[in-house]
Amino acid sequence: MSTFFIIAVIVLVFLIIFQIAKASEYVAVLKGEEKARKDNNKVNGFFMIAFLIAGLIAVYYCNDALYGKTLMVHESASTQGDEVDHMIWVTLILTGIVFLITQILLFWFAYKYQESPKRKAFYFPHNNKLEAIWTIVPTLVLTILIVIGLRNWFAFTGEAPKNAMEIEVIGKQFNWIFRYPGNDGVFGKKYYKMIDATNSLGMNWHDSASIHVTDDPAAHDDIILEQGTVYMVKNKPTKFIIGSRDVVHDVGLPWFRLKMDAVPGTPTTLWLTPKFTTKEMIEKTGNPNFAYEISCDQICGQGHYSMRGVIMVVTQPEFDEWMAKQKPAYYAAYPDKDPANMKPAVPVATDSSKATASVIQAPSKKLLRQSPSNKF
Amino acid sequence: MNEETVLHTGTELVIPHDAVHHDGHHEHHQSFITKYVFSQDHKMISKQFLITGMVWAVLGGLMSVLFRLQLGFPDTSFPILETLLGKWAKGGHIDPEAYYALVTMHGTIMIFFVLTAGLSGTFANFLIPLQVGARDMASPFLNMLSYWFFFSASIVMLSSLFVETGPFSGGWTAYPPLSALGSASPGSKEGMDLWLIAMALFVVSSLLGGLNYISTILNMRTKGMSMTRLPLTIWGLFFTAILGVLSFPVLLSGFILLIFDRNFGTSFYLSDIFINGVGALPNEGGNAILYQHLFWFLGHPEVYIVILPGMGIVSEIMSINSRKPIFGYTAMVASLFAIAILSFLVWAHHMFVTGMNPFLGSIFVLLTLLIAVPSSIKVFNWITTLWRGNIRFTPAMLFSIGFVSMFISGGLTGIWMGNSAIDIHIHDTYFIIAHFHLVMGVAAMFGMFAGVYHWFPKMYGRFMNNNLAYIHFWISMIGAYVIFWPMHYEGLAGMPRRYYDYSNWESFKQFAELNKVISFTAIVVFAAQILFLLNFFYSIWKGRKVTTLNPWSANTLEWTTPIHAGHGNWEGEIPEVYRGAYDYGKEGIDFIPQNVPLGADEKTH
């Protein structure tokens, strides 16, 4: 019922506007074309200048209301992001000046030079000097922006430092899977045809002659996180090796001001240095629920909007403590191979004690070693 | 061989009886079918494009209203949604799949069916023969085919809305593997097949039209109409057609590979894929990014295909209504040319974060930011055209000024996004939505409205209602800024685009109130567009009649034709041209049409 009511009201409003417009057109015809044009000019000329002034005031209030909700009020949480923020400010100031000048001139001229019988239009077909000025000035300004931009771009996309921690990030419909190389510091080989219910990344955990896969011991100690939370260390450069299991996703890191696509079959990389731990950010933002969220920024299907990951940035000791508790995914898939399960049953477990020991030993040192290998 | 004989030999092949009439004015012999349906008159074809485009604009606009309801009021139930969408909106809530389908179809429809076919189809068809002084297009028959291919593309696209698995829902860019695999998304099943067929037909339509526009402009200009005397509308449409002809085939090739991947088991774009519930796919060795290169090789010129006709239209209208020559005609043409060239060299700026070679990325940064130079020349020249003019605020003029304002606001943020080191932060956030809607969405729509208001008297021999037009303009102008300006802030919060719901996101949920305001404004602005349509159709039959040949006191040739011009446009000889299109206010004379010979002591500029 209310729907019909609303529709009726809308139709009525339309009819009224329409009738008024029609009636005023008749009036205009009676007044004569010249007079009607003059009236229209006056009204619209006034609206032009009113729009400019009201618009600029509205821009101010809009900024007042929304600025605090953007990331501009929060210092970037990565060193790379500081450069992005800096560039945004430089670009904002330069484009802002051009915006104000051009919009003000546009509407002010429109208002000022509305038709008047007292004035004749100034015949001004071209002026080479003026045109040269507004070709050269923008070119110079853009050159500055390009130079700053490319310097940062090469810094962001250049090689990660040698001591960077490496984490693999794999997108799938509709969540994120993370992998650490484990004690040996080497990412074990994987192959997508190995993926099954217990092997979410397709690690080469056993021989499979039909698809030419051989068991890779380096894959046995890899830590795989499927719960959507990944741990990083404050002030430690971290390199993400990004991939996808199905369609194109994108690792969006708004708090770090970075993002990178996750493409099936073609690994990409992104490295950054986090500046603040999650705890520090909770204090800085005053939001007890604060989390470094990973948003999927490339449409990936109907669950796209819910593809959320979380980065926990912690200190090195906290990280070591956390890492020590992690169990290689291999043992979850093959509980019988887990030394923890074997201990009471089998007395001759020489290599199992070694494995347990090495988990307890500071594993982070071994994580430093670089060795990205994705497929066999 | 003059234009007349060319035209008539052309038509003779198809409808022999046309050739009998040498004055090109023979409507009284035409049946309803040949006059209104399978017409070969460029003016009728342009109206067909325009009205089909309007139907699409209403559909595409309505879709945006529907998904804005979801974004603005995620917790409210709208029973009307269930009435409209049925199983896609159970309980009055759009479900995510339908939301993504709406977003995707909104983009596809608006960019291709409204702002490409609807805009350049309308004005290229209408203005090229009339303004260059030709009786019709180089090939009226191909021109007719161009419309009917567009029409069949429309039918196929429309039918995709009704298939059981829904229309395509993977974004208008249709990136594989999502678009290639029905198992990854219901929209990528039959809906995507129809989407691809429709787009292939669309490309054919666009090529037939484009080749025709180019050959007409190059070969069929009337005596004296040198290229440098062409109105800027024609230059805009000329470059548009060239862009289309060179880039649409590349898109089609990308689509063909996609069709192969979808249906014939190839692996152009597919590699290493495991789909939940299906398992590992056999495809290996393909590259999903290849599609993006092929797509954006059209996709970027496409945004200029959308905006260049608007630039031409706005230049023309601004000059006429300022009663001044367009400032820097040569610079305007040169900047159009520069934009057209550069538009082919910047496609990968859509792909900075795909992991492509950073060095390659840096080249694209350089070329992308270069486009700002010709763009700023255009803006400054438009503003200088207003300076010391004698401005008449016709509805067309208002929309032209609105166009420039939108183009500035949206264009400047292009400098942000074109710089890859900023793009890496705001790519695929609301910032880009704000950017492209202002610079090519709203601006191009404004260019289209300006054109419709300005040439309506020539199309139908009547005027549209001015007061409705003014209401339409001011609501659209204010509304467009209210909708898109605040989106920059959402983008600067990193808020991703194409999200169905933000309430679970700690980083993005602070904009709930703002989203309500935006959605409400979108509905109001949509209603204002309905007002425009009412005005349009009412005025076709009941508008104030045009009584003079040249109601806007303009210089171009279309205003030398009869008020109701028949097929062939001019009753007698085609007028000869002696001057450029912008002799307004020259030596104290208000305007001197192009067909007026130079005075004895008149200076040429």
Image (spheres, coloured by chain):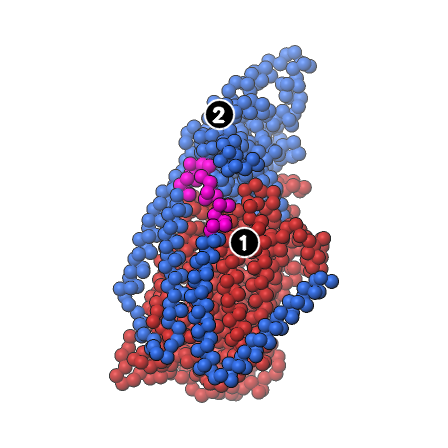
Chain colours: A blue, B red
Query: Which one is nearer the viewer's eye here, B560 or B382?
Result: B382
Tag 1: Cα neighbours inside 10 Å, few (<14), some, or many (≥20)? some
Viewer can see residue A188: yes
Is residue A342 left or right of B317 when viewed as pictured?
Answer: right
The magenta-colored residue range is A63-85
The answer to whether B179 is drawn above or below residue B279 in the figure is: below
Residue drawn at 67 percent across, 64 percent down: A6
B20 is within the stretch colored magenta: no
Is residue B413 left or right of B261 when viewed as pictured?
Answer: left
Mark drawn on residue A60: none
Q: Which residue is mark 1?
A: B173
Q: Please name the amino acid that badge 2 sits on.
A: Gln
The answer to whether B271 is drawn above or below residue B521 in the figure is: above
Residue occupying the far top of the picture: A347
Secondary element under disc 1, as helix, strand or loop, is loop
Residue drawn at 61 percent across, 49 percent down: B500
Residue A341 on image: x %, y %: 66, 19
Main SS, magenta region, reads helix
Picture quarter with the C terminus of chain A: top right
Q: Please name the amino acid that badge 1 sits on.
A: Thr
Secondary element under disc 2, as helix, strand or loop, is helix
Residue B290 on image: x %, y %: 50, 49
Residue B57 on image: x %, y %: 57, 65
Q: Which residue is mark 2?
A: A316
Residue drawn at 28 percent across, 77 percent down: B604
